[in-house]
Amino acid sequence: MTSLRTRVLLSASVVLVTALGCASVLLDRAFRESALNAVEDRLRGRIYMLIGAADFDAPSTRPLVGELPDSTLSMPGSGNYVRILSDNGKTRWQSRSLLGLSLPLPRRIQTGAWRLERTTTSANEGLFSLGYAILWEGAGKRKARQFVIQACENENLYLSTVTRFRRSLWMWFAGLSIGLLVVQTLNLNWGLRPLRSVDDEVREIEAGSREAITGKYPKELQSLTRNLNRLLRHNRDSLRRYRNALGDLAHSIKTPLAVLRNEFSADSQEIARDVAREQLSRIDRTVEYHLHRAAAAGRSLLAPPLMVEPVAVRLLDTLRKVHAHRNLELVAELDAQAVFFGDEGDLMEIIGNLADNACKWARKRVVVKATRAKSANGAPRLELEIVDDGPGMPENQLELLVERGTRLDQSVEGHGIGLAIVRDMVEDIYNGRLSFESSGEGTHAHVEIEFG
């Protein structure tokens, strides 16, 4: 795969050479037409001169034309020739320059019409021939007579002029092409310099000597560098979460394992089942909590946005089946434009845990709302609300809802880690905000996540 610089330079060079080539062809054509018009103008001038000098009423014994002011018409083989033809094609008069030469008759010309054509002399000399037909009403003549006046010019002057122009044109265009290619190469090197700088910074990141792209780049590259930095930060955050989760997990299960070890080393014949069950349950909750926390994918603006509505609808359908015995009314008020920039599993954890907790406490009704909004800087923001009509709880207990392993009512199923996972996911991983409001008419969970 060729480099971007080579591809752009090659394509631009092809366009440049093609454009200059087409321009040169058009200029050459325009010049040839102009030169041909000049030939025709000169021949017309000779014809008008001949008409003015000719005496068409002269008898056949006397020449029609006397001396002409153009000396080239008196020099044999000069390349400039004129003659007058009668209506039957016979030559009535010809210039001295045609001495020893003969010309083919011009094609038939209507009276008052001009005809330019190419022809050759008997000596194979290439000529431009211009013919003009006039109708002459002589004195005392009852019938007008037609005369054809033919003027010829050697084509060498035209060809040499065109050749010199073409040589000069191609030389100038070749020099212009080389100059433009050099300027284009310099301009391309200057224009691609920011890309080379980005490449250098990326190589430094790969080598471990840099953690992020910090250079100032044109606005066309700012989105690229910003998203690359987000991707790098996301990867570092994921690695840090895994490391922290492993460290927290090892630290958290150390105490229950020590208790179990002491029970096994006791003198009693049987392990205290209640103590063992309690410590194993503690280990299970701890492992589940840290695995969920470490598995969170985190935000990603590089991925396509995830529509919230279909995910929430699937979750509510599942919860209706899980809590079918309670006949709860699960209401979805979902903005069809609401999007989530992150992993689908994370969104399911957030909505699923909050909605499941609301179902456990609700009397008859749970409402799940999703709204798309915009922050002050124009970044997309997702707002989730889960409302139940349960008994509510005192304000001083709301903070305990998100504490890992805390269960405010032992009669309700659960491990007490679902809301803690939601809190960590919303606040630590997605930099959002999770809040609760409660009264005697139920509990209201509110999630705000800004994707900036």
Image (spheres, rainbow, N blue to C red):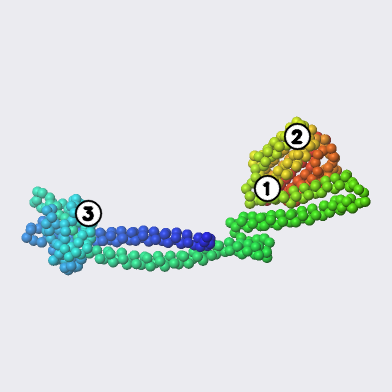
Q: Position of residue 228 (x, y in %)?
A: 64, 57
Q: Residues within 10 Å of mark 2 (few under 14, many from 20)?
A: some
Q: Which residue is mark 3?
A: 114
Q: Nearer the viewer, residue 72 or 7?
A: 7
Task: Tell whether 256 sits left or right of 139.
Answer: right
Q: State the CA–CA distance, disc 1 to disc 2.
A: 26 Å
Q: Which residue is mark 1?
A: 343
| Label disc, if present, on residue 381 of the rendered structure | none
Secondary structure beneath dot 3 equals strand
- Is 170 rendered above or below residue 430? below
Residue 413 is at least partly visible in this image: yes
Q: Residues within 10 Å of mark 1 (few under 14, many from 20)?
A: some
Whichever of callouts 3 and 2 sits on the residue coming sooner in the sequence is 3
User: Which residue is at 68% across, 47% downward?
Assistant: 343
Q: State the CA–CA distance, disc 3 to disc 1.
A: 84 Å
User: Which residue is at 28% across, 59% downward?
Assistant: 37
Labels 3 and 2 touching (C-beta < 8 A): no
